[in-house]
Each structure stands twice: as structure tokens, then as C-alpha cells.
Image: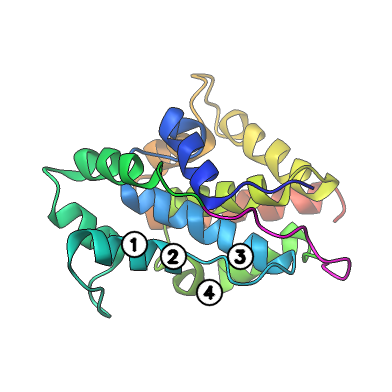
Amino acid sequence: MALMTLGEVLGAVRRDPLAFLTSRRLGSLSHFLSGRDLALNHLGIGGWSDLPIVGRVEQHHGATTTPWRSWTDIVEFFALDEWDAFDKFLAFACGWNDPVPAPPTSFATPPPVATLLEQVARRPPMFLGKKSCLRLADFLRGYLCTLGASDDVQELERFCAKIPALCGDDTGRPWFRVLRFRIGSQGEAFDEFFRLWALERAATGR
């Protein structure tokens, strides 16, 4: 299983942001990378968190992170707006030359995706900061694309693809936009995702 370096991941995001993220904002990217970090940990590959990003952003801008100021806050402070911050950060990051992550250890057994979803549903602040269907989507995209293809991953991807139809939507928009538009608040859309997931699991006898 070949894993991309952080620079390669960010380069792919730069080329086609909406293939990976819910929006062209650093917040979306941050949650995507959180999902990637967790997947790498589950694969037994430690030391691949966003700490390299923090240090590089601090050095580049001459500012330090604090409990109330993240690396995304620093980048946005030195940009014209959210979209300019996104573009400038990726332009800066595309020059990084990180080593390739080690392959997954032979003992690594990521938990079932259903187990991860149960954990996220119980403790959204721990994984996402708060209930949000958009944060959930970015987090899951980072997690799933790092794990690679498996029956588990494909089951969740099929479910996500079904959500618009379950909501009576045929516009072709992705599931998170459908839920956000039809439900209203991001928190309620988050809850609706897990309600539909529970119904799907029950219908398939899982």
C-alpha cells in the first residue's frame, strides 16, 4: 500500500480542491488532514500529524500558535481573505519535500469504519470540534482516502452516495450539501447523517 507524502497530498488538493474538500477553506483542509492523521495512526504509522505544518507556518510567518490561535488562524491573518489564505498556504506547501511514510505495519488493524463512526457520533468535539456535517465530510474524506479501498470503506462510500436519493434529491450534489440545504443547521445535518446511517445498518442486518 503506497502512501503519499504530506507534500503530495497537499499538491493533489491544490490541483483539484473540491475532489478532496467540502470548500476552498483552510478549515476544510485542517479537518481533512485530521482524518488522514487518524488513519495513519490506525495503520501503525506514528509521527505523521500536522505538527510539521505548525512549525513551518510559525517559521514562515514569524508567529506562534497558542491554545486559542491555530496554524490556520495565522495563515488567514496574513491573507486577504479565506480563499486567499487557502491558495497562499498551498502555494507555500507545494515546495515541501517530506520523506515517504513507512508502509503500514503487519500488526496494524484499523477498526471497522462503523466503530469509528460510533465514536465520532458519541464525541463529536473530540474529532471535529463540534457537530458539523461539513466537518464530518472533510474528516471522513481524509480518513477514507488514506486507508485505501476495502469492503468497509466501500460500504460507507456507497451509503454516502445514497444519501441524496434517501432525501429525495436528484440534483447531483454531494451528500453533505444536500443535508446542509435540506436540514438547516450543520449540527442537525450531522445528526441526520447518523440517523440515516443507523437505518441503513439496520436494513442490511448489521
Circle 3 sits on which residue? 38
Residue contact at pointers 1 and 4, CB within 8 angstroms: no
Instruction: Give the residue number, with chain letter if any, for mark 1.
Output: 56
Q: Which of 170/118 is in front?
A: 118
Q: Secondary structure at mark 3?
A: helix
Callout 1 amino acid? Arg
Q: Earlier in the sequence, mark 1 or mark 4?
A: 1
Name the N-terminal-most of marks 4 and 2. 2
Residue positioned 54% across, 42% down in the render:
8
Dot label at residue 123: 4
Q: Amino acid at mark 4?
A: Arg
Gap in angstroms between the C-alphas marked 4 and 2: 26 Å
149 left or right of 128 in image: right
Residue 106 in percent (x, y) is at: 88, 66
Q: Position of residue 27 (x, y in %)?
A: 34, 53
Disc 1 to disc 4, C-alpha distance:
30 Å
Look at the numbered discs 1 and 2 and tell me whether their residues touch, using CB distance below 8 Å: yes
Secondary structure, mark 4, is: loop
Judge from the rendering whether residue 108 lies leftward or rightward of residue 74; answer left or right: right
- Spatial CA span between label 3 and label 4: 15 Å
Residue with the mark numbered 2: 52
Q: Earlier in the sequence, mark 2 or mark 3?
A: 3
Image-based side of 82 in relation to 10, left or right: left
* Residue extent of the magenta highlight: 98-108
Disc 4 residue crowd, few under 14, some 14–19, many 20+, Cα 10 Å: some
Residue type at the position of mark 3: Leu
**Color encoding of the figure:** rainbow
As helix, strand or loop, the secondary structure at mark 2 comes to helix
Mark 2 to mark 3 CA distance (whole Å): 16 Å
